[in-house]
Image (spheres, helix red, strand yellow):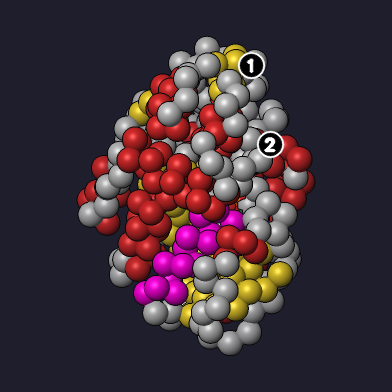
Amino acid sequence: MRVVITGGAGFVGSHLVERYLRDGHEVVAIDNLCTGSLRNLDDASENPRLTFVRADAAMPLPVRGQVDLVLHFSSPASLVDYTRLALETLAVNSAGTGHACDLAERHGARLLFASTSEVYGDPHVHPQPESYWGNVNPVGERACYDEAKRFGEALITTRMRKGPLDARIVRIFNTYGPRMAENDGRAVPNFFAQALAGKPLTVYGDGNQTRSFTYVDDLVEGIVRLAAHPEARGAIVNIGNPEETTIAAAAAIIAEAAGVAFHVEHRPLPPDDPARRKPDIARARALLGWEPATPLREGITRTLAWWRSARGYST
Ligand code: NAD
Ligand code: UDP
């Protein structure tokens, strides 16, 4: 199979690149490196089945030759990144998703779109099943991301109603692991960087807001299964770990794993920060036989080991 992965030099994208290479496929990774890094592809770069193309995925995708699967994963993904790159985020998830659809349709390839638990906004339904329409502020600071992903979903489902496109949508819940950018402002990398530097951990608000953190290998397994399923045209599937934790508890787990005292510096909660988030994964279980295999503490320990060896922290 020849797999095109937009956002292939990003955190999740680079793990997908490695997985498809390991499974024996050819991979074309497209990335403009706005939040990703070629360092994320260091381990894969010698593989002759990998082609890297530096390009903007909001534009028509410059891919020639056979295409069997398109994974559209290019998008800034953290509050800090998508606030800085707000218009680019809107473009890559709207026009860019259209170009990903065009490429897939032209080649009779499947498309898998990286959507997000942010489509549920600050949810009134808990845990969140795929049938929930969400509670999103369409004009707030997060809208450039949340609404762009919702538009991407609307575009894909509309194109499937009007044409032969075979697409699947994965709604990804907060995922962490090796290669998360150190400076993208998300909770897990912030807490790692702060703990390892012996600084207080910055908890926004009272820290009682919850998230459900998924280890990246578990996410990749779910994505590969959804993409490969022979009868999942049009499927929309939550992939996330139903192990819900408060942000204060996640910070404490990271401090404990790093072997440092747990000191907190409280900062204001960003606007529209969702109060609770936990996936209902009944559909992933039934359709894909998938559920996460990595408990939070274990994933944190693995990520910490990588952080120390790859990023040179001695603490
Ligand atoms: P990331 O920032 O590490 O990766 C995104 C990659 O896309 C980067 O390499 C970046 O350079 C590239 N990119 C962005 N805009 C581009 C453009 N216009 N053209 C070409 N390349 C571009 O973020 P991530 O966490 O790996 O997220 C990957 C995807 O998964 C995103 O679509 C994101 O919305 C989705 N997602 C991630 C999470 C998570 O917890 N990690 C949760 C929900 C959804
Ligand atoms: N957060 C925090 N301290 C940080 C970074 C984030 O308390 O240094 C909080 C943030 O307000 C949110 C949660 O942690 O409630 C998860 O934030 P992240 O940006 O990782 O993901 P998202 O908000 O997109 O789910």
Kind of residue at disc 2: Val
Residue drawn at x 37%, y 74% is 23
How crowded pointer 1 is (Cα within 10 Å; few <14, some 14-19, many 20+) is rated as few
In the image, which residues are magenta?
7-23
How crowded pointer 2 is (Cα within 10 Å; few <14, some 14-19, many 20+) is rated as some
Does residue 283 appear in this view? no
Residue 58 drawn above or below residue 117: below
Specify whether 250 is left or right of 312: left
- Specify the label residue 24 is tagged with: none
Residue 196 drawn above or below residue 248: below
Kind of residue at disc 1: Arg
Front residue of this view, candidates 245 and 239: 245
Specify whether 163 is left or right of 225: right
Q: Main secondary structure of the magenta part?
A: helix
Q: Position of residue 163 (x, y in %)?
A: 51, 69
Is-magenta flag for residue 28?
A: no
Residue drawn at x 44%, y 74% is 21
Residue drawn at x 26%, y 42% is 282
Q: Label 2: state its secondary structure.
A: helix
Specify whether 159 is left or right of 185: left
Residue drawn at x 76%, y 40% is 84
Q: Which of the 4 quarters of the picture holds residue 99? A: bottom right
Ligand 2 within 8 angstroms of badge 2 C-beta: yes
Q: Position of residue 128 (x, y in %)?
A: 38, 33
Q: Position of residue 188 (x, y in %)?
A: 51, 35
The CA distance from mark 1 to mark 2 is 15 Å
Task: Report the mark closest to the observer, 1 or 2.
Answer: 1
In the picture of the structure, the residue carrying the numbered disc 2 is 80
Q: Label 1: state its secondary structure.
A: strand
Specify whether 287 is left or right of 136: left
